[in-house]
C-alpha cells in the first residue's frame, strides 16, 4: 500500500511512485494507493480517495496560502480523514508493505497509528526533500525545532526511512544515531518519456541563431538566490541568452531583457520541446548540499 497526498504523474513524486511501485519486476503484488485526489489516471492501481475536491482551483489556491502559515503543512488537519479511510481498508485487507510518501510531511504522524494497528506490516517512510533540515527552514530555528520534534516522535515507528542521497542519509544518521540502520538511499530517477522526447527532437530543433541557456525550476531569496546568475548574463558581452521557466515569485524573477526571458511553468511535454531547442541547461545548486539529485540525474541523462 502507498499512502500519499494528491500528485501529478509528471511531477517529481509522480515519476518516483510510478517508477518504483508500478515496476512489475520489482513489485510482486498490485499497488493499493490511498491519496487525497489526482487529476491523472493511475492505470493498474487499486485506488482509494480520501476526499474528492469539488473546486480544485480554489482548493489549490487556498493550499498555497496556507502552506506559508501552517507548519509543516495543511495535512496536519486531515489525519482523522486518512485514519477513517485506512480503518475501512484494513478491516478487509492485509498488506505486507505500507509506504507513506512524504511530502506532505504531516503524513509522518500516521506512522504510529498504522504500526499500532498493523504491527506485522513493514512500514516505510519514502521521504523526498529532508524534513527538519529542509532548505525552506533555513534561518527559521523554530521550524527546525518543530521538525526535529515530529521526526523524533514519528521515525521510531517506521521500519525503513528512504532518502534520496547519501548526504541526506549521513545527516539523518548523525541526528538520530539510534535509528541509523533505518535510513536507506533510493535515488530519484528520471522520467524516461521526457528524456526520450528531448533526445528525439534535439538534432532537428536546436536553436543555432543564438546560444541559448535554459533553466527550468524555482528560485528562493534564501538558499537559491538567482541575483548573481542574472548579473552574469546582463554583464556578459557574449551572444547568448537565458530562458527561464518556472513558478517563481515576483521578487525572484529577472527583468526581461535581450539577455534574459522569464516564462511561467509549462506542461512537462511542452518543456521537452523547449529543452530540445536549448544549447545548454543550467543546474543551480542550493546553498547547502541537502538537495534532491533528480535534476542532476535528468541533466546527465539528456547529455
Image (spheres, rainbow, N blue to C red):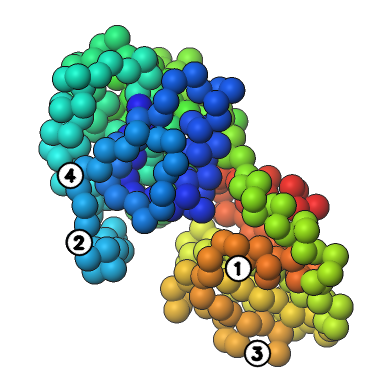
- Residue bearing the label numbered 4: 78
Q: Residue at x 80, y 80 (%)?
A: 240
Circle 3/circle 2 CB separation < 8 Å: no
Q: Quadrant of residue 98?
A: top left
Is 92 placed left or right of 250 in the picture?
left
SS type, badge 4: loop
Alpha carbon distance from label 2 to label 1: 28 Å
Dot 2 or dot 4, earlier in sequence:
2
Give residue 175's position: percent from left, percent from top. 43, 27
Residue with the most extreme top position: 120
Q: Residue at x 51, y 49 (%)?
A: 12
In the image, residue 109 sits, relative to residue 51, either above or below, namely: above
Q: Residue at x 86, y 78 (%)?
A: 208
Dot 1 or dot 3, earlier in sequence:
3
Dot 4 or dot 1, earlier in sequence:
4
Give residue 206's position: percent from left, percent from top. 81, 71
Categorize mark 4 by other alpha carbons within 10 Å: few (<14), some (14-19), many (20+). Answer: some
Q: Which of marks 1 and 3 is in front?
A: 1
Circle 2/circle 1 CB separation < 8 Å: no
Q: Mark on residue 54? A: 2
In the image, residue 158 sits, relative to residue 43, either above or below, namely: above
Q: Which of 132 and 183 is in front in this view?
A: 183
Regarding residue 43, the answer to whether it shows in the image is: yes
Alpha carbon distance from label 4 to label 1: 34 Å
Amino acid at each position: 500500500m502507498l499512502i500519499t497526498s494528491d500528485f501529478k504523474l509528471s511531477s517529481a513524486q509522480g515519476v518516483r511512485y510510478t517508477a518504483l511501485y508500478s515496476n512489475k519486476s520489482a513489485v510482486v503484488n498490485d499497488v493499493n494507493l490511498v491519496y487525497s485526489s489526482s487529476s491523472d489516471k493511475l492505470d493498474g492501481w487499486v485506488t482509494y480517495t480520501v476526499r474528492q475536491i469539488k473546486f480544485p482551483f480554489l482548493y489549490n489556491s487556498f493550499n498555497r496560502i496556507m502552506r506559508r502559515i501552517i507548519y509543516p503543512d495543511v495535512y496536519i488537519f486531515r489525519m482523522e480523514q486518512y485514519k477513517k479511510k485506512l480503518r475501512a481498508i484494513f478491516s478487509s485487507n492485509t498488506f505486507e508493505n505500507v509506504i507513506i510518501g512524504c511530502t506532505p510531511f504531516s503524513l509522518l504522524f500516521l506512522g504510529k497509528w498504522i504500526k499500532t494497528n498493523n504491527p506485522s506490516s513493514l512500514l516505510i517512510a519514502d521521504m523526498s526533500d529532508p524534513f527538519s533540515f529542509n532548505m525552506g527552514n533555513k534561518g527559521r530555528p523554530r521550524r527546525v525545532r518543530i521538525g526535529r520534534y515530529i521526526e523524533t516522535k514519528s521515525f521510531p515507528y517506521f521500519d525503513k526511512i528512504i532518502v534520496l542521497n547519501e548526504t541526506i542519509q549521513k545527516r539523518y544518521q548523525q541526528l538520530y544515531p539510534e535509528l541509523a540502520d533505518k535510513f536507506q538511499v533510493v535515488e530519484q530517477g528520471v522520467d524516461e518519456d521526457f528524456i526520450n522526447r528531448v533526445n528525439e527532437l534535439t538534432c532537428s530543433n536546436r536553436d543555432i541563431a543564438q546560444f541559448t541557456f535554459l533553466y527550468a525550476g524555482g528560485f528562493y531569496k534564501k538558499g537559491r538566490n538567482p541575483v548573481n546568475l542574472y548579473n552574469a548574463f546582463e554583464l556578459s558581452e557574449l551572444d547568448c541568452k537565458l530562458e527561464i521557466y518556472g513558478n517563481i515569485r515576483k521578487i525572484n524573477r529577472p527583468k526581461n531583457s535581450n539577455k534574459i526571458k522569464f516564462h511561467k511553468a509549462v506542461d512537462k511535454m511542452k518543456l521537452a520541446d523547449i529543452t530540445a531547442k536549448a544549447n545548454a541547461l543550467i543546474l543551480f545548486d542550493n546553498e547547502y548540499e541537502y538537495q534532491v539529485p533528480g535534476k542532476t540525474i535528468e541533466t546527465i541523462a539528456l547529455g
